[in-house]
Image (cartoon, grey):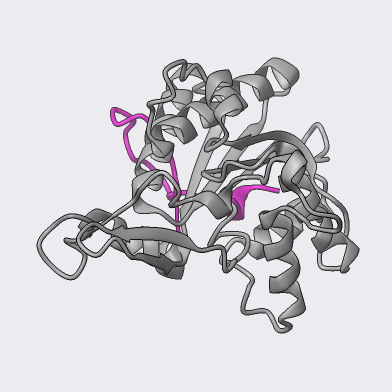
Amino acid sequence: MATSSDGISFYFFDFDDNIMFLTTPIFLLNTVTKAERAVNTGEFANIHPHLGRPGPWEDYATFADSFRRFRDIPPDQLEPGQTQHFVDDVMKAVASGGDQWQGPSWKFFVYACARQRPLSLVTARGHSRETLQEGVRVLHRNGLIPQEPRYHTIFPVGNKDVQLELGDTKLEMTIPALKRRAIIQTVEEAVKLHGSEPNLRFGMSDDDPRNVDLIIRAMCECKKSYPDRRFFVINTHMQEEVKLEVFPVETPVVGKPDTGFGLMK
């Protein structure tokens, strides 16, 4: 925990392609042949805007079971000794050796765990919070993070129960819109808990340009509500690691610009 004079830094993370590269497949349906095609999350982020449009992906679409590996197996369907998909995928990545599974935000994640900074996971996955924590626990058991995270919030926004928590009563909001609500709620809870602390900092990284856009919008909304707090965004799309601090558009630019998590402690 940061000292009172330093303030408190809250770290928000998307998981896939940020903390870790996992092999969890997303299944696309060829609407002509009815055959499925598996792609990884990084591929999907690039392919998604082109689905159904003229070109190599015009015959492909997502369908009800596209993200089946991103949800929990119902407890009554788990076979003896079987683990949830997320936990299994984390174990496979770690067992593969090397560091190729480490995402561009891995170093920030390890730092936040080591320093026990309040940490939030905001992910499109639909697993339970307990499953996400168990997957992260694999990293600790293998000595890859010094301590388990000091969780502030966990929002797997693909989970129907979490969607309802976020006010999506008709279960029709998009993943980026749900992430936006999760970010705002996380900030509100932090201010409620630590409102007397003058130096609160919030930073989030994400790899999907659509999500980054809504993160910036969410952070701008939070900045307007809490102008004395600081908000940072890191865009890790294609491992670019573009860092910025968020201000309302009417704020004049003066002095040396601030550039992201580097100012967080």
Question: Which residue corresponds to the image point at 82% horizontal and 51% vertical from the top-left?
Answer: 115
In depth, the one of 26 and 209 nearer the eye is 26
Front position in the image: 71 or 81: 81
Indicate the position of residue 217 as horizontal and vertical percent values: 37, 33
Q: Would residue 139 appear left or right of 233 to someone viewing this image?
A: right
Q: Is residue 60 left or right of residue 241?
A: left
Q: Which residues are magenta?
A: 241-265
Q: Position of residue 142 (x, y in %)?
A: 87, 68
Residue 88 in magenta?
Answer: no
Q: Main secondary structure of the magenta part?
A: loop
**Residue 30 placement: quadrant:** bottom left
Task: Residue at 18% x, 55% y: name it.
Answer: 52
Position of residue 51 in the picture relative to residue 102 (left or right): left
Whether residue 41 is visible here, answered yes or no, is yes
Which of the 4 image quadrants contains residue 195?
top right
Question: Where in the figure is residue 189, as x and y percent of width and height?
Answer: 66, 21
State the residue at coordinates (71%, 48%).
265
Q: Name the foreground residue: 129 vs 106.
A: 129
263 is within the stretch colored magenta: yes
